Image (cartoon, grey):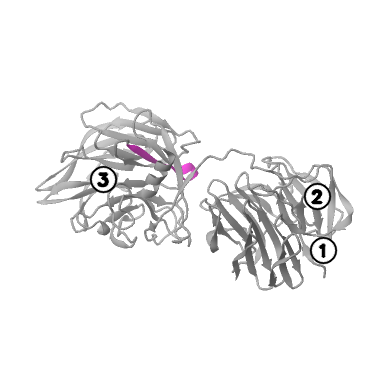
Amino acid sequence: MKSISTKISAKTSLLAALVLSSSASVASQPTGLALQTQQFMLQAAPEQLSLQDNSGQSLGQWTGRFERLKALQLPEQSWFAAVDSETNQVLVGLKTATDKVRILQQASTQLVVDDLCWYYSEQNKQLSLFLIGDRGVGEQWLLAQDGKALEKALPVRSLNLPTNASACAVDQRQGLLYLAEGDTALWSYSAELEQSENRQLLDVLAPKGAIAGEIKALELTAAGDLLALQSEPAALLRYPAGQFSKAPQRLPLQMDEPEVLQLDRDGLSVGATAQQLQRLNSTDKAQQVQHWGRTVPAFYQLSPTLETAAVSYRGDAIDDPAIWQHPTDPAKSLILATDKRAGLAVYNMQGAQQQFLAVGRVNNVDLRYGFHYQGQSMALAAASTRADNGIQLFGISADGKVSTLTRIQTGLTDIYGLCMYQPAGTQQFYVFANSKDGTVAQYQISASAKGASGKLVRSLKVPSQPEGCVADDGQHQLFVGEEDVGIWRFDARASAATQGEFIIKADDQMLVADVEGLAFWPGKQPYLLVSSQGNDSYVLYKATAPYEAVLRFRIRLNPDLAIDGSSETDGLELTTLNLGPGFEQGAILVQDGRNRMPEQGQNIKLVPLAQLKTLLQQLK
């Protein structure tokens, strides 16, 4: 058996990419399959995988029958991967600029791996590897972050794929994973670690589509064209970049059941096996791209250091957090989180659940301190209840016991978001509750010997569905998020005019709808923190006119603590209060819509506020 080698040239670009001309024919001369970067040659013999530098000196050898050889050139690292077809081991390693070779992974996987694909996220500075299985399951492993390789590959994302998935390719520019479903369909998925598994159908089996046989291999060109190798009848399909609505260009191939497709610096090769490759003649040789060719918006990165226990069921459940500071021991502070299916969950500062109050479908929660109730001073929390359009009040005693007080019935038709307002220096308490029709109702909360009660004092209005809101107690401001549109500011005082001011637009660039959770950061320069749910990010604005955007960030996974990042965030909170070790300067709390590592129910992620303070200092 001849050796298998694949030859790919790569310069100092972030990733090597290649382009194929539209005019091609099969050359009669067979070619070898080679895989080579500037830094090494990876070669698979019948019983061994070997790594050599460009002078031929051995850098490493591994026993096995390896296939699916993959290489990737980054500025300071050269990566390689392969699958042992007999043991199903996946080998992942890298060679640094100093010729040091590290193996991150050489272990069996439960997947029967049909293909491997690299993805480098320029936005999040993460390198990952897709493993495509043949039983409807795929995985995405994190390999490096911020240019630093992990100690070992970290499985982050599980993918539910078609049962006969056969090949993959990644468009590095668009952040898309292309997947062939045998002879049935061609799909695209987001390649980002924290994205959903939503997929888009690109092509289907004839006569409704252009696919006439099983797709065995995929490749991406520098121009973004997707090449699909069809086995029988043998043909190469070429989908021009971003033009899947048009029929692909079809090049019939004069060979029996090709399964291998290789794109290199000299052009394109196809064949039934790695030892039977034939070069396709093309008028334009393969070219290398030195940049992505797209403008990538800057996202700063924060990392969680604590997460709460996940709810026991999957799907949309946790929505909005609040934080209660213990009066004498910050480490005994509590995290409150709404469970939209059942009630209010209470967690300690280790993330473990301490209480659950089964009050029904609560959506948003907020709290204030110093509420005098039946002879006791306590914290007052309020939550919107979806089942009866009500406001549920809770009391939190000095020792951290949460109890229900009363339920206030509102006149709202479809209650949704909620926040509280306590004018600075007063013992007055207000709740703002909003409805999907745009109504924002302000209730004054009071206590008597008979218990707590609420009185409607005025109503506000935004044009369409709101949810997130937050009050600036010191300056008497109310900020309301109109989900598809942007953010409004109102005077929070009960006696003030009801006319609002539209201050921040969801422009699909800095702030991407839905506009979800809002949090206020008081100080000499106050800030407004907003969940930009449409692109899984968070935007920090100045909370004073003209309400300029300061920065945006994402919360990505913390590989050291094995805590995944956050995405699809609904509610959030920001506090400057001391919450104990690790959170002495306060915290950012966010709902995580896609809780991974492992895949499970939703939860709350906590980021030390010190991380954001450091970032702001660096930007000054």
Q: Is residue 314 left or right of residue 373?
A: right
Ranked by sequence position, the earlier of labels 2 and 3 is 2
Q: Nearer the viewer, mark 2 or mark 3?
A: 2
Q: Nearer the viewer, mark 2 or mark 1?
A: 2
Ranked by sequence position, the earlier of labels 2 and 1 is 2
- Write the start and end of the magenta stretch as one range: 526-538
Q: SS class of the residue under badge 3?
A: strand
Q: x, y (%) of residue 142?
A: 55, 58
Q: SS class of the residue under badge 1?
A: loop
98, 248: nearer the viewer: 98
Does 92 lie within the magenta span? Answer: no
Q: Does the image show residue 167?
A: no
Does 530 lie within the magenta span? Answer: yes
Q: Residue at x 72, y 68 (%)?
A: 49
Q: x, y (%) of residue 539?
A: 42, 40
Q: Is residue 150 left or right of residue 205?
A: left
Q: Does the image show residue 313?
A: yes
Ranked by sequence position, the earlier of labels 1 and 3 is 1
Q: Which residue is mark 3?
A: 391
Q: Amino acid at mark 3?
A: Ile
Q: Which residue is mark 2?
A: 266
* Quadrant location of the N terminus in the rendered image: bottom right
Q: Main secondary structure of the magenta part?
A: strand
Distance Cα–Cα, label 2 vs label 1: 18 Å
Q: x, y (%) of residue 355?
A: 28, 61
Q: Is residue 367 left or right of residue 81?
A: left
Q: Amino acid at mark 1?
A: Gln
Q: Is residue 333 above or below residue 23?
A: below
Mark 2: few, some, or many residues within 10 Å (few <14, many ≥20)? many
Q: Which residue is mark 1?
A: 275
* Quadrant location of the C terminus in the rendered image: top left
